């Protein structure tokens, strides 16, 4: 008895069914497989199966469980972001779903026909394959069909028996139909496109996978999973070893794919682009939210606020009731008091939603430098016969916050280290401004000795007066306290080591911070704390980062390594993207004008004047309005929302149930209006 074909399965999934494999439904699914394909599809649609069902899952390593009572379904089309602070069990849950680890309690139900594949953070590949062979193994079934089609074609010329010839032709037609259905006649091109998208070069295709770094091996495994097109992809930090260009390519690839997805990521832009549901693991529980990361973040705050108000109202009710009981339990209203005691016993206690503890990072009050901090004149640097940058000329001023962006291997870290004097330039001159005091955060975390404990490691050079109590106080400001501060750095997690390195950076009282990938290893909450601390830092900052959200929050300008060299742009990452879009539009307009002019002169056919790559201009969704007018209305609407929030917390409103309902209705209406105004404003900026 055969299982449902992938064709049937995928068609069923697109129709919105779900595979749920409780025993009786598994039997039903197997019975369906024995029915002729003409009738199978309509029956499968009625069965309603989920891709994956998780029920009451619990995993425990020590005395306390990592998580407990985790229950959810994965439906076709779900793109789930799995978020939570470091150490809450996200990777453990993912490994259990993939069958790599096991649950202590609960069950996971999956149709036998559902294909699940997982990308792990840490791999160790020792088999002898080339990069291209490793990636193409994700398409092994289709390559096998290609090989079979060639074998069948060769057999035709040698067959003399009519019945055998008929059988071979029937099989050949079936194989070719399957290849057509998967558009699988040019598989090598598909493999190449994915490898290029993930940042590999053609000259690397024939290298043994054992010659690649761990990060590159992660990327090749990601390529293999993408090419295999499983029904459910489990991706643990897929962007960890990708530069911005490869991350954006992956976002587009996943947005276009039909596969369901569960992804762990600390990249907020990535989560916003690819997810439509969010599961938060926190304090051993799973909480569920609709929408992407931004929607989750907003809903979490709204839930906390709603829960806080409900908690306060309940506390007021309890206090009033207890006061009544106290005053009347021995008086004429004894029966009423006893009745209220019973009511209090039946009250279901409202629990506050605990927030993730914010780490109160700070980098102190810096001393003042001169007006300019670095003066670089015609710097160049390379290794061997390869030039990384040349003719770098820039004066970096006090208060600048400059992000360095570009592909992996372009020279971002080399430029940063050259600017701070760690590497000598091959040519050119570099001067430091008056009163400059540098501190450098190295992404390899070499600034913290792995053989020291945290208290010893944060002591800045030449500061014997920096004693243990001061060190412990400093570490506490970066979220490290208790026994962990006496643990060797070598035994700490990546996130803990990062916090020690940041604390040591703070201890140096620098007025110029130079940071190389400071968000690596930090969870979403720690990243937000770091952003706030750096926003409050009143010095100069130069940093390398692949975290686009981080760059948007902090950068006043960006240095970008592009194919034709380095370029400096004002603004943050979003400003840079807008600039590149405008430049591309201007290029297209100029190209179109040149083609039109050539067509008029008769040098080109008339239909050649239109580029095949041109896209139709976006149509207006809203009536024409000037952007400044919309901005004013946005500001007014936000003020109205603020006034409603103030009224919502006032004692008079809290006592008036009808007014609270009206406030909630008005609040939702204004939120919807504000969302539409922002959309209108973006359209005005683009089309006006």
Image: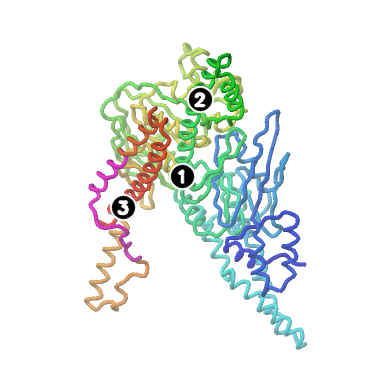
- Mark earlier in primary sequence (1, 3): 1
Residue 591: image location, x then y, percent: 28, 65
- Residue denoted by label 2: 315
Label 3 element class? helix
Where is residue 344, by image quadrant? top right
Up-down: is 673 above or below 502?
A: below
* Residue 633 forms part of the magenta stretch: yes
Q: Residue at x 47, y 40 (%)?
A: 297
Q: Where is residue 367? Give x, y as percent.
A: 33, 21
First along the sequence among labels 1 and 2: 1
Work out how far the residue at label 1 is from the one at label 3, CA to CA, in angstroms: 20 Å
Residue drawn at 61 percent across, 52 percent down: 74
Q: Which residues are magenta?
A: 615-638
Q: Nearer the viewer, mark 1 or mark 2?
A: 2
Which sits earlier in the primary sequence, circle 3 or circle 2?
Answer: 2
The residue mark sitting in front, 3 or 2, is 2
| 463 horizontally vs 594: left or right | right
Residue 680: mark: 3
Nearer the observer, 435 or 685: 685
Q: Residue furthest top?
A: 465
**Secondary structure under badge 2?**
helix
* Residue 401 appears in the rendering: yes
Q: Nearer the viewer, residue 652 or 512?
A: 652
Q: Position of residue 271 (x, y in %)?
A: 49, 46
Residue under numbered circle 1: 295
Q: Nearer the viewer, residue 499 or 262?
A: 262
**Disc 1: CA contacts within 10 A as few (<14), some (14-19) or many (>=20):** some
């Amino acid at each position: 008895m055969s299982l449902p074909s992938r064709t049937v399965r995928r068609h069923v999934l697109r129709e919105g069914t779900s595979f749920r494999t409780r025993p009786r439904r598994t039997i039903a699914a197997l019975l369906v497989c024995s029915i002729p394909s003409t009738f199978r599809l309509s029956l499968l649609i009625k069965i309603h199966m989920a891709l994956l069902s998780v029920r009451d899952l619990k995993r425990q390593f020590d005395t306390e469980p990592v998580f407990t009572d985790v229950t959810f379904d994965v439906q076709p089309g779900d793109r789930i972001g799995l978020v939570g602070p470091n150490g809450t069990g996200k990777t453990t849950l993912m490994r259990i779903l993939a069958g790599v680890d096991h649950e202590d309690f609960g069950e996971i139900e999956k149709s036998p026909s559902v294909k699940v594949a997982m990308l792990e953070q840490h791999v160790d590949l020792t088999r002898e394959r080339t990069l291209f062979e490793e990636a193409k193994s994700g398409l092994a079934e289709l390559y096998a069909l290609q090989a079979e089609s060639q074998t069948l074609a060769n057999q035709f010329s040698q067959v003399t028996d009519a019945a055998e010839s008929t059988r071979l032709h029937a099989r050949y037609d079936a194989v070719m139909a399957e290849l057509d259905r998967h558009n699988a006649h040019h598989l090598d091109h598909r493999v190449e496109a994915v490898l290029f998208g993930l940042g590999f070069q053609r000259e690397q295709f024939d290298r043994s996978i054992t010659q690649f770094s761990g990060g590159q091996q992660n990327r090749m495994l990601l390529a293999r999973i993408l090419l295999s097109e499983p029904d459910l992809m489990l991706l643990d930090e897929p962007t960890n070893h990708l530069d911005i260009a490869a991350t954006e390519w992956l976002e587009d690839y996943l947005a276009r794919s039909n596969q369901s997805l569960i992804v762990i990521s600390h990249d907020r832009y990535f989560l916003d682009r690819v997810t439509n549901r969010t599961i938060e693991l926190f304090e051993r529980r799973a909480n569920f939210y609709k929408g992407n990361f931004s929607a989750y973040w907003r809903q979490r705050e709204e839930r906390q606020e709603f829960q806080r108000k409900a908690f306060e109202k309940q506390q007021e009710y309890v206090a009033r009731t207890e006061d009544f009981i106290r005053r009347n339990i021995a008086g004429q209203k004894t029966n009423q008091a006893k009745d209220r005691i019973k009511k209090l016993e039946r009250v279901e206690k409202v629990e506050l939603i605990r927030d993730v503890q914010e780490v109160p990072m700070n980098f102190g009050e810096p001393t003042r430098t001169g007006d300019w901090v670095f003066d670089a004149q015609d710097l160049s640097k390379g290794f061997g016969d390869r030039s990384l940058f040349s003719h770098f000329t820039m004066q970096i001023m006090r208060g600048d916050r400059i992000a360095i962006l570009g592909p992996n291997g372009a020279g971002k870290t080399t430029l940063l280290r050259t600017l701070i004097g760690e590497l000598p330039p091959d040519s050119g001159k570099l001067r430091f401004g008056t009163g400059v005091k540098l501190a450098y955060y190295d992404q390899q975390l070499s600034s913290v000795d792995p053989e020291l404990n945290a208290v010893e490691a944060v002591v800045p050079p030449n500061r014997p007066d920096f004693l243990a109590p001061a060190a412990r106080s400093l570490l506490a400001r970066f979220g490290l306290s208790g026994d962990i501060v006496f643990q060797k750095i070598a035994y700490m997690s990546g996130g803990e080591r990062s916090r020690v390195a940041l604390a040591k950076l703070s201890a140096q009282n620098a007025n110029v911070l130079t940071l190389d990938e400071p968000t690596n290893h930090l969870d979403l909450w720690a990243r937000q704390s770091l952003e706030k601390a750096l926003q409050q830092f009143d010095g100069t900052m130069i940093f390398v980062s692949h975290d686009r959200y981080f760059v948007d929050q902090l950068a006043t300008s960006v240095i970008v390594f592009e194919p034709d060299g380095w370029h400096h742009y004002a603004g943050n990452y979003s400003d840079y993207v807008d600039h590149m879009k405008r430049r591309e539009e201007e290029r297209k307009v100029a190209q179109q004008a040149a083609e039109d002019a050539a067509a008029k002169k008769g040098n080109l056919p008339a239909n050649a004047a239109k580029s095949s790559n041109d896209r139709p201009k976006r149509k207006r969704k809203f009536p024409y309005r000037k952007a400044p007018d919309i901005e004013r209305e946005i500001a007014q609407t936000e003020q109205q929302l603020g006034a409603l929030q103030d009224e919502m917390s006032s004692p008079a409103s809290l006592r008036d149930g009808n007014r609270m309902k009206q406030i909630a209705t008005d609040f939702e209406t204004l939120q919807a209006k504000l969302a539409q105004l922002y959309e209108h404003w973006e359209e005005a900026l683009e089309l006006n």
